[in-house]
Image (tube, rainbow, N blue to C red):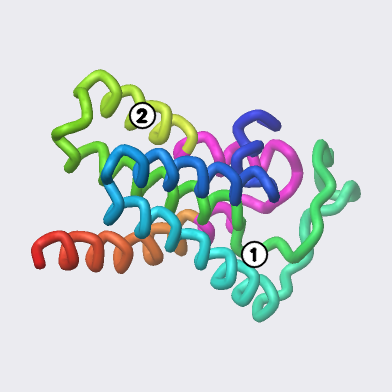
Amino acid sequence: MLGISFFGELPWSLIMVLIVASIFFIAKFRHEAYFITSILSSGLVILGIKNIINRPRPTEFYVRLVEINRFQSFPSGHVMSYILFFGFIIILMKNLKSIPNSIRQTVTYISLFLMLLIPFSRVYLGAHWLSDTIGGFILGLICLYPICYFYFKKKRE
């Protein structure tokens, strides 16, 4: 479960987004690279909501803690980030037909795997309550919508 959560930890989450955006940029998918990079702004949304809600994380009194975390608990930033980043990657893999099908399918399945397991990982590690991960999942989908909307709108222009 620590391995599943790895890509959501700083600085690795930042590095991963920048590496993936760089790969798209180098492969001449500049439009996509800019939108992938824009996902970094979701960190501000996460921190803002965490500070407004100010819900404490689970403690050893209630759960077995595998991982000690900073910041507040709601919503799960890992879950929101995974839904947003890997969800957008899946959207790209469905639409960029110039990328070989085997690569598109592999990336899609890995992304889907990580998106589905991250909520369970965060609860298992004692980092979040189930409601935190559900909130992160929903917030991730809410933030994914405008990114996809503007991506497709800009692509048509």
Q: Which mark is residue 146?
A: none
- Is residue 125 in the magenta section? yes
Determine the residue located farthest toward the right in the rendered image: 61
The image quadrant where one finds the N terminus is: top right
**Disc nearer the start of the sequence (2/1):** 1
Name which residue lies at 18% across and 66% down: 154
Q: Secondary structure at mark 1?
A: loop
Q: Which mark is residue 74?
A: 1
Residue span colored magenta: 115-136
Residue 15: image location, x then y, percent: 60, 45
Determine the residue located farthest toward the bottom in the rendered image: 52
Three-letter residue code for mark 1 = Phe
Q: Secondary structure at mark 2?
A: helix
Classify 50 as above or below 61: below
Name which residue lies at 27% across and 43% down: 28
Name which residue lies at 36% across and 51% down: 33
- Is residue 50 in the magenta section? no
Q: Nearer the viewer, residue 53 or 86?
A: 86
Dot 2 alpha-carbon crowd within 10 angstroms: few under 14, some 14 to 19, many 20 or more? some
| Side of 120 where 105 appears, left or right | left
Dot 1 alpha-carbon crowd within 10 angstroms: few under 14, some 14 to 19, many 20 or more? many
Hey, which quadrant is residue 74 in on the image? Answer: bottom right
Q: Nearer the viewer, residue 23 or 72?
A: 23
